[in-house]
Every structure is written in C-alpha cells, then in structure tokens.
Image (tube, rainbow, N blue to C red):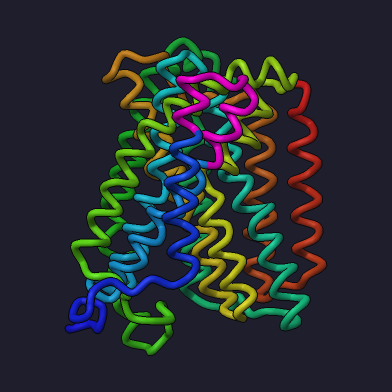
Amino acid sequence: MSHPATATGPVFVRSDYVVLAGGAAAVLLAGVTRYAGGGEVLAFFCSAVAVTLLAALVGRSVEQLGDRFGPGATGVLQSALGNLPELFIALFALKAGLVAVVQAALIGSILANLLLVLGMCFVVGGLKHGPQNLDSKRAQSIIVLMVLSVAAMVIPSIAHYVHTPVSAHESTFSIFVSVILLLVFAVTLPASLKRGGETEAEGVDMHQEPPRWPLWLAVALLAAAAVLAAFVSDWFVTALEPAMASLGISEAFAGLVVVAIAGNAIENVVGIQLAAANRSEYAFSVVINSPMQIALVLAPLLVILSHVFGFAALTLVFSPMLVISVVVAVILTAFITFDGESTWAEGAALIAVYAVIAASFWWG
C-alpha cells in the first residue's frame, strides 16, 4: 500500500509541530532544571511536562504506523509503547526504593482510566450527543478480560490479609502470579490482533486518515522518544522526593494521582476526543485497554524486573485501601458497561468517586 507521505515526504499538521516543539523545549528545560538548578518543585514540574509530551510523541508515532500494520496490531503496539514512560518512571522509582509510590501509581493508573477518564468521556460524549451506546460484544469481551486481569493482580493482596500461610511468601507468590499474567497476555494477544482485523473488515473507521509520515520518520521519532523518556523519567524520579517534601504530598498521593496522571495523560486525551466524535464504543475500548495492559503486562513485568535488576523488591501486595478502591472501580465500570449505554450523569458520578478516592490518600 502506498501513501502520499512516503512519496512527497513527511506532512506535519499544527498538532505535530506542537508535540515536537513542545517536547523538545520541555526536555531541554527539564535537563536545565535538573543539572543547573532552579528548585525542586520547578524541576519536578518541568520533568512531568516533558514525560507527558514524550508520551504524546510516542502515541503520535505509533498512530502514524497505523495502516501499515492494521488496527489490531497498532492498538496493541500503542497500548504497549504508551506505557513506556510509566515503565521507566516505575523502574527508577524502585531503584530509589520508592516501592509505595510505584504500587500507588499502578493502582492509580487503573483508577484514573476507569473513573476519571471514562467519566470524562461519558460527560463530554453525553452532553454533546446524548446517551451513547456501549452495547457491543467487543466492549463486553474487553471489560470481562479487564475484570479477570485486575482480579488476578489483587489476589496476592487478599491472600496476604486473609490467608496467613501465604503472607510469609508474598514475594514468591507475586512472581508466580506475574508469570501467569504475562502468559495470559501472550495467549490473548493473537485474539486481540484478530479482533482488530475483524473490525477493519466490518468497515469501522479505526483511523481517521492515512499516515502522513514515512515509515522511517515514525520509527526514528518513536526510538528517540523512547530514549529521551528513559532520561527524563530518571530526572522526574530524582525530583519527586524533594518535591513531595516541599509540597507536603504523601508518597501514596504522589503515586496514585501525580505519577499516574502524568504517565497516562495522552491516552486520556485520545479517549475523550473519540467520545466527543461520537465514537463511544471505540473510546471505551481505548480507555479500558489501558488498565487491562497495566494488570496483564506492566505490573507483572515490574515485579519480575525489580528482582532481576536487584532494585527494591516490588510485590503485588497492595494496601487494603488500594485494593478496595480498585475493586470498587472495576465493579462500577462493569456495571455501567453491561447496562449497554452511558450518560453524562453516570460520567459525573464516576469523576466524583475518583475525586473522593484521591482525596482519601492526601494524608498518606
């Protein structure tokens, strides 16, 4: 398949220039504040903005790979690579011994997607288009897999609190569960790719336009963004502890809200844009796919890598409040999904639940 962009060179729109120029400026400012000084809070803010814009560049590059691999493969690729900033931040945080921040960030990412972002999608789509349809087999299959994945991820926590013999072996059990979750991801990957192919065959518009960038540019920018994300994530974590002390933010709140939202900001915007365009089922799939990837891939991968690299050991034993919060979020999302439609009032309620949960972690 040929594309105009490959024949005439890259075609940039205004948003591309904003992402490229903004990302370059943010990385430069983050580097200056990291090494030349400027205060802990400013360094933290600059690195957080840089992480967000680099995540945007990753998403934009993957999007431009679009038609070349098909919507199914592109969706999986976007979900996997979209978590790169979160992966790097979590690894550097574990290296610094900030296990509580990482655990809160993992649960916070799930909560942000299921409550805050999904709620915003419902509000924006509902106010603009009225009640939106979610009654599709694809949406229901995604939510079922997400519920099962999150359930498996929190089982070590439940076992730790109610099954005493396991509590002495939480590290071993967490590694075992992590391997199982990664195997589930590997087994379900072909089905995800197939669903993408079936969707394409049904004529659903998964991409609004053909790629505007040649393949070499998309790959080059993707690689550059990934490398820069590694450096900026290190700066972000280095500034995190001093910033928490200066702002009086607890580790739990920093991970649950600040780190989680910074790492998922761009995915969130994409879901809201799709809801505003009245593509409710696709918006729902994009938003729900992110917490599923966190439970199936990111969390178990971090557990294994923390042991491989000799960092502070991460386990899947979360605090009781984190477990209760994520269980509430999953139940609410599943209930709304199987209801078959969404309204702006339901979205407002989801956002309110997120605000209450986030506020409960302000003090730790």
Can you give x and y, in whole percent of width and height, for residue 279 in the image? 56, 79
Report the magenta stretch's main SS.
helix
The reply, left or right, for residue 205 in relation to residue 198 is: right
Q: Quadrant of residue 315?
A: top left
**Residue 220 shows in the view:** yes
The reply, left or right, for residue 99 in relation to residue 81 is: right
* Quadrant assignment for the N terminus: bottom left
353 is higher (above) or lower (below) than 7: above
136 is higher (above) or lower (below) than 58: below
Q: Residue at x 49, y 66 (%)?
A: 15
The boundaries of the magenta stretch are 30-49
69 is higher (above) or lower (below) than 258: below
Residue 335 vs residue 75, the one in the foreground? 75
Residue positioned most to the bottom:
203
Q: Residue at x 34, y 60 (%)?
A: 61
Can you give x and y, in whole percent of width and height, for residue 160 in the image? 54, 20
Number of numbered discs overlaid on the protein picture: 0
Residue positioned most to the top:
168
Q: Residue at x 44, y 49 (%)?
A: 55
- Whether 43 is among the magenta residues is yes
- Whether 144 is among the magenta residues is no
**Residue 194 shows in the view:** no
* Quadrant assignment for the C terminus: top right
Q: Quadrant of residue 75?
A: bottom left
Can you give x and y, in whole percent of width and height, for residue 267 in the image? 51, 56
